[in-house]
Amino acid sequence: MTIHWCGTGLSAIPGLRRLIENGREVTVWNRTVEKAEEAVGDLTKDIRAFSLNELAEALKPGDIAVSMLPGDLHVPVAKLCLENGAHFVSSSYIAPEIKALDDAFKEAGLACVNEIGLDPGIDHLMAHWLVADYRASDAYDAGNKLSFISYCGGVPKIPNPFRYKFSWSPLGVLKALRSPSKSIKDGQPYDVARPWDAISSYDAPLQKPESFEVYPNRDSLPFMEDYKFDPAWDVDLFVRGTLRLNGWADAWKDVFAEVETLEGDAGDARLKEMSDQFWDENSYDEGEPDRVIMCVALKAHKDGADAYHKTYVMDAWGDDRGTAMARLVSTPVSLAIDMVLDGKAPAGVTAATADPELIETWMGHVKELAQHVAVVDHTA
C-alpha cells in the first residue's frame, strides 16, 4: 500500500516527514518538484510532478491518496481514488461534492477521511470527548440547558499593530470575511452576514487566563448531529468560530469597510491587491514564532447553576520544530493515514474520529505537539 501525498505547502510538511521517517511507503507529489525536494528531499527521492493524469496512472487498489492541495482539487482526487480502488484523506471540510460520494465509497469498501487537521480536526476530537464525558457524568440530564463553543485561531506569538500575521497568501482570509455564518444564540438560530457584525469577547482559561476577540464562522448547525447532540436537548448556545487577538477588530476596521464594498471582477482584483500588500507588510519573518489557541467547551445549566462545565484547551507556538500551525494541521493527517493503514477507518465519507481509544491516542500526540493541553473543570 503506497501513500500518495499530494501537496507540500507550509502546513503539510511535519506529518509527511513523520510518515516517511516511520518507514511508510510514500510517493510525494507536488506541482513544483523543487519545493518538495527542499521539504523532504533529505528523506526520499520518490518525488514527482503532480498531475491528475500521472496520479491516476500510479494509484493502485488499496493505496491512499492524501490531498493537501488547493480545495478545488480534492473532489477530482477523491474520484480518482474511487476509480482506482484507493482510499482518500484530506484535512479540509467535507464539501457537498465529497459528501455526495459517500455511497460510492461505502459500496467500494473504501475510506474517505476528511476534517482531520487542526480546525477542522483537533476541535472535533475535543468536542467528541466532551460530549461523551458529559453523557457519562452524574450531571447528565436530558432537561439541562446546554451551551457549546469551539474557538480556534492562529495568531502571532509576538503581537504586531495589525494584530495578525500571515503564513501564506492573505487572499483566503480576505475572502472568508465575506462569508455568512449560522449558529445558535439564546436558543434561536443566529444568522450573521459578515464576521465583524458578531465580534464578542472571550476569556480563555489558559495557563495564564487571557481574553480574545471571537466571531462565528461557517455553518455550525450540522455539527450538532456530528457531535451526537440529542435532538431533544435544550441548546441555548452552539457556535464554532474564529479567535483573534484583542484589538483585531479595531486594527482591521478599514479592511472591513472596504471589503464590504467590493463586487465583481474589479472587486476580486482589489482583493488581490490588498492580499499582496498585507503579505508584504504582515507575513511572518524567518523563524518568527506563530501561535495557535483552541478552546472547546460544553456547559450544562440546571436549576440556576452549572451542573457541568468543562473546557478543552490548547495553546501552541512555533519553536525549533517549526510552526505550530504546520505541526497541528499535518500530524493529525498522518495519524488518520495510520488509521486507514491499520484497517480502523470505516468505509464511506467521514470526519475526525469519535472513537474513544483513538481520541485518547491522538490527543496524546497533540499534547506532544502543543506546549499546553488541558481539560479545565469549572465546577470543581
Image (tube, rainbow, N blue to C red):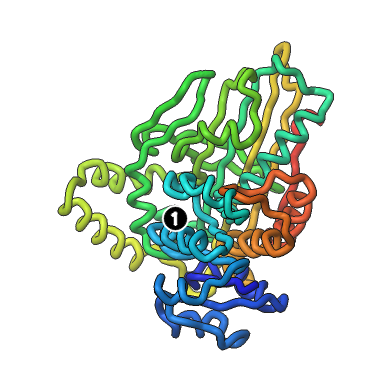
Q: For this rendering, which residue is in front, 1 or 293?
A: 1
- Residue 135 shown left or right of residue 266 in the figure: right
* Residue 320 visible to an observer of this rendering: no
Q: Residue at x 49, y 75 (%)?
A: 286
Quadrant (top left, top right, bottom left, bottom right) of the N terminus: bottom right
Label 1 crowding class (10 Å Cα cut-off): few <14, some 14-19, many 20+?
A: many
- Location of residue 89 in the rendering, given as x and y in whole percent from the top left corner: 56, 59
211 or 134, nearer to the observer: 134
Q: Is residue 46 left or right of residue 169?
A: right
Is residue 291 at all visible to an observer of this figure? yes
The C terminus is located in which quarter?
top right
The relative height of residue 181 versus residue 292 in the rendered view (above or below) is above
Residue occupying the point 50% across, 54% down: 92
Where 82 falls versus 30 (above or below)?
Answer: above
Instruction: Relative to 2, say whether 118 is above or below.
Output: above
For badge 1, the amino acid type reads Tyr
Q: Residue 273 at what x, y percent from top left?
A: 24, 61
| Res. 367 image quadrant | bottom right
* Residue in the foreground of this view, choosing between 116 and 337: 337
Q: Position of residue 195 (x, y in %)?
A: 39, 38
As drawn, the residue found furthest toward the front would be 107
Q: Position of residue 267 (x, y in %)?
A: 19, 51
Q: Which residue is mark 1?
A: 164
66, above or below 26, in the image: above
| Horizontal side of residue 102 vs 263, given as left or right | right
Tell which residue pokes out farthest to the left in this image.
266
* Towards the viewer: 368 or 19: 19
Quick one: SS at disc 1? loop
Q: Using residue 307 as the reference point, say whether residue 290 is left or right of it.
A: left
Instruction: Name, please, the residue furthest toward the top.
Output: 303
Residue pictured at 43% horizontal, 44% vertical:
96
